[in-house]
Image: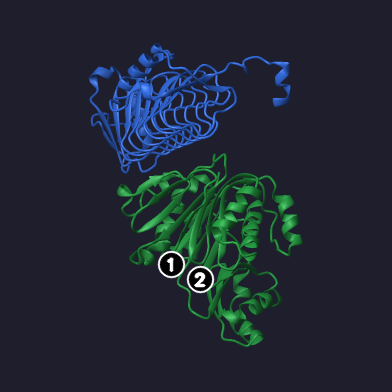
Amino acid sequence: MCGIVGLFLKDKALEPQLGALLSQMLVKLTERGPDSAGIAIYGSAEPGRAKITVQSPSPSRDFPKLGSELGEKIGALVTVTVKSTHAVIDVPEAKAQEAREAIPELRPDARVMGAGESVEIYKEVGLPKDVVQRFGIEKMSGRHGIGHTRMATESAVTTLGAHPFSTGPDQCLVHNGSLSNHNNLRRELKREGMKFETENDTEVAAAYLSSKIAQGQGLGEALESGLRDLDGFYTFVVGTKDGFAVVRDPIACKPAVMAETDQYVAFGSEYSALANLPGIENAKVWEPEPSTVYVWEH
Amino acid sequence: MNLSTPVAVQSREVNYAPRVFDLSETPLRELNQALHNVGEAGDEPAWEVLNPKGSHAVAVGVDKAVAVNVRGSVGYYCAGMNDGATITVHGSAGPGVAENMMSGTVVVKGNASQYAGATGRGGLLVIEGDASSRCGISMKGIDIVVRGNVGHMSAFMGQSGSLVVLGDAGDALGDSLYEAKLYVRGSVKSLGADCIKKKMHPKHIERLRRLLERAGITDVKPEEFTRYGSARTLYNFNIDNADAY
């Protein structure tokens, strides 16, 4: 099963509520996947700064002095905001790559969940309501976000196996379905130099899109390529710094419903996820077509 | 048709008096139990269901000729196994609306998701918006009228009954079709295996006219439709088709 949601705000007035809206959408889909949950929030980017979200199995050991040690190592001002098992590290954009390389040296057990100018990614094992509460997602503002609640079918129930998967700057992906050619694709992508943290099929889809985008394709083009190269069942919702995209495989047996008003575009695995959004009574509600790429950008 | 032997239903702490069920206050099971407990349908007024908010299995297994109006959009399997009721969804329906309907009428004012009317044995399903993929899959006697378009693989393995589409049909319409009758007014993206275009004879026009009338559709004429049906070449194994397996 799995449940996925996405919310892209057109109306700035709703931005302070993004986290709250996305949280209640995800909690509504708990029955579709109670194993683990995750959310990616795209907030406003601060010019010249980058964010790295890391997760640690021992946050009280790993996080307290991370800011000062990392700052010293890369020679820059670093701030660390800790939220439960995750920490968002704010670094100068020019030093972002250096910081990413330094983190595993300083904190071998910490894992990078995602990085970019605006994305913050939070995911853990547990029910959606507990995961969103743990990270205070409901208080977060932002321009768009995506979320996932997992019922694992093909790889372990772990924090790293939870979605969203992020394999490129400000890029992340959530997936309902299962891929059948991910092992082959993973080998090909590894040969191209992509790095993988898990044996999960969704990570391969995310890395595939990141690889296409790195080769110069736009988000829409990368997803069109994916329709040719990814085999299996999938409904994907993808986030980038400025955008949000939806695509379903040609068979389209994984459910999907969308709603659009003047204020937002919303995606849910089921209508129940959308049922409490403002103005839903008068929204345009439809099912995205199979093999069709939908992209919205700010 | 009620195949079960009537048994005494134990009294439950359920208030049957009001026929308005607000699902934001009342559990879904109470609604469905009350619908299943209806004695003589003639005694029952119209039922109103408020705030469904995408709930699954709203008004499933109703077997009396009651009228149920659902005010809002529903999730999976609304009006499934309907046997005699008239159920109207004033919104959109999730996957499997009116699945395995036996008799009665189900109307969806908005769009319907995949496999609407799947395996239905009788009754009439009217979708006023679009239906997505696999509409009428394995239909076995149900009549389905869709005012908008239907998605791919609609009427897959349809055995009997009719699928009427006022708009367009997606890929592989009527794949592996048995004797279900398909009428499409718009375009068909592609026909499935063993599904072919057929001539509209006067008896088909008459049949379609009656069906459109039952669905309350008065603004289109049966002559505007094209009929599709089974070429009947897949009914039995033929050694010449071995390569297709």
- Image coordinates of residue B133 in percent, x first then y, are 49, 35
Q: Is residue B59 left or right of residue A77?
A: left
Please report contact status of discs 2 and 1: CB closer than 8 Å, yes or no. yes
Residue A125 visible in rendering: no
Which residue is under mark 2? A118
Q: Residues within 10 Å of mark 2 (few under 14, many from 20)?
A: many
Q: Tag 2: residue type?
A: Ser
Of pointers 2 and 1, the one earlier in the residue sequence: 2
Q: Helix, strand, or loop for circle 2?
A: loop
Q: Which chain is blue?
A: B
Which residue is under mark 1? A142
- Image coordinates of residue A275 in percent, x first then y, are 37, 48
Q: Chain of mark 1?
A: A
Task: State the image quarter where residue B78 is shown.
Answer: top left
Quick one: quadrant of the C terminus of chain A? Answer: bottom left
Label number found at residue A68: none
Residue found 67% across the figure and 53% down from its top: A200
Q: Which chain is green?
A: A
Task: State the image quarter where residue A53 is shown.
Answer: bottom right
Q: Residues within 10 Å of mark 1 (few under 14, many from 20)?
A: many
Colour setting: by chain
Q: Gap between marks 2 and 1, in whole Å?
A: 9 Å
